[in-house]
Image: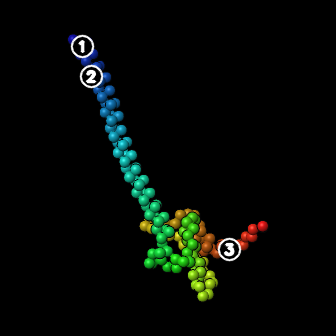
Amino acid sequence: MELILIIIFIIALVVGIFLGVYIGKLISERKFLDEIKEHRKDAVLKSRAVLTGQFSEQLAPYFPDFPYNPNECKFIGKPIDFVVFKGLDNKENPQIDEIVFVEVKSGKSKLSKFEKSVKEAVEDKRVRFEEYRVGF
């Protein structure tokens, strides 16, 4: 009788272990699938934010509160969004009065380290003009 109880106990223990492993695996897979859904949702939101930012950057000169004439703005994109040549659109007296580097930001975004370094180079007057001639 004791032997039968020991055998039943061992069988119940083995079945319990297999059930525990199987249930743990199911729970783990379900959690993994839920995490994938969250990661995908987060990726879509971030992608939309980036696309909205890029779209806004290119349309910025046409917004009513943009401080420069859109015809004087040249989109570069990287490392700075625009270079503005103030006076470029003056048909009667074409003369560049000022050159302005413009970086467009939306929401809570901040200047990147590289954009800050461009800003500092301009503020420190480490800007120059160079002429390059092709030799043919």
Residue 124 x %, y %: 63, 74
Q: Is residue 41 above or below residue 132?
A: above
Residue nearest the viewer, comparing 92 with 82:
92
Q: In 3D space, how far apart are the residues under numbered discs 2 and 1 (Cα atoms)? A: 12 Å
> Residue 88 location, x and y as percent?
59, 80
Q: Residue at x 36, y 43 (%)?
A: 33
Read off the residue under disc 2. Answer: 12
* Picture coordinates of residue 73, whole percent (x, y): 55, 75
Residue position for label 3: 128
Q: Is residue 63 above or below residue 26?
A: below
State if disc 3 and disc 1 touch (CB < 8 Å). Answer: no
Which image quadrant: the C terminus?
bottom right
Q: Which residue is mark 1?
A: 4
Tell me the amino acid under the disc marked 3. Arg
Q: Earlier in the sequence, mark 2 or mark 3?
A: 2
Q: Which of the two residues, 23 or 42, is positioned nearer the viewer here?
A: 42
Q: Is residue 98 left or right of residue 130?
A: left
Give the secondary structure at mark 1: helix
Q: Is residue 135 left or right of residue 35?
A: right
What color scheme is it?
rainbow
Who's the residue at 43% across and 61% down the image? Answer: 49
User: Which comes sooner in the sequence, label 2 or label 1?
Assistant: 1
What x and y, as percent, mark residue 51? 46, 61
Which element is circle 2 on? helix
How far apart are labels 1 and 3 at the CA level? 94 Å
